[in-house]
Image (cartoon, rainbow, N blue to C red):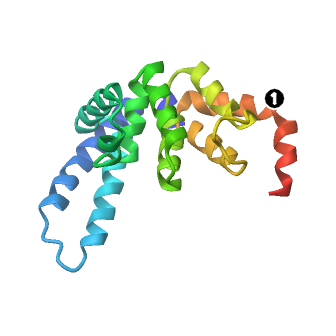
Amino acid sequence: MLETTKDYGLFKEFMTDLLSPLTEFISNKDSTGTEVQFRLLKAEISSWLCQMEYKTCQEKAGKIQKILETNDIKELREGFRDSELCLAVKHGHEDVWLKVFKFFKQSKSIEEKSKYLRSLGCTSYVWLLNRYLHLMNEPDSGLLRQDGLRLYQAATQTPVGIYVAWNTFRTSWKVWKNFSDL
């Protein structure tokens, strides 16, 4: 909700000034014995920076968009975080969203499917969010019933997505009522 206030710009600037030196510090730190902890901390900080649309994340998001143009799923699987893919979808157009959806449908890995599913909810286009949220009603979408909740969780990560998700949830209440047997 902070993103919808007038103070978000100041908050974003403060957080990037606070977090960007931490990433460099952790990268240069000798992490003997606690390597996993440092990698997890760096991933968390990088995720926050991507949410703040930090320049390195924007550069990686641009690379992801170029990779999507070439349909190179192997390169997309390697070396990119969820938050960077999310930013690429957020700033991409319909073609980026459709490519990520195509990769979602082609993927056999549950972890990969989850990554793509979360990223699809990052779009800033209301009509794509509506399409995304109505996927659970389409039998050939490649979604399992239990993915319905993930759709809504991913969509509510954007300021506009909160309103779209709530409206879609209200209008498809009968569908959700039938989910009680999960």
Characterize the local packing of mark 1: few (<14), some (14-19) or many (20 or more) Cα atoms within 10 angstroms: few
Occupied quadrant, residue 90? top left
The quarter of the picture where the N terminus appears is: top right
The quarter of the picture where the C terminus appears is: bottom right
Vertical placement of residue 91 versus 113, above or below: above
The x and y percentages for residue 157 are 53, 39
Disc 1 element = helix
Q: Residue at x 22, y 47 (%)?
A: 20
Residue located farthest toward the bottom when viewing the structure as drawn: 33
Q: Image check: 92 left or right of 64?
A: right
The x and y percentages for residue 52 are 35, 38
Q: Residue at x 41, y 32 (%)?
A: 8
Is residue 113 at all visible to an observer of this figure?
A: yes
Residue of label 1: 171
Q: Amino acid at mark 1?
A: Thr
Judging depth in this view, the residue of 74 and 136 nearest the camera is 74
Q: Image check: 21 left or right of 87?
A: left
Occupied quadrant, residue 73? top left
Judging depth in this view, the residue of 85 and 165 nearest the camera is 85
Vertical placement of residue 113 versus 137, above or below: below
Is residue 6 at all visible to an observer of this figure?
A: no
The x and y percentages for residue 161 are 59, 31
Give the total of numbered labels: 1
Vertical placement of residue 165 versus 28, above or below: above
Q: Residue at x 43, y 30 (%)?
A: 89
Q: Residue at x 48, y 19 (%)?
A: 94
Q: Image check: 8 left or right of 118?
A: left
The x and y percentages for residue 82 are 40, 46
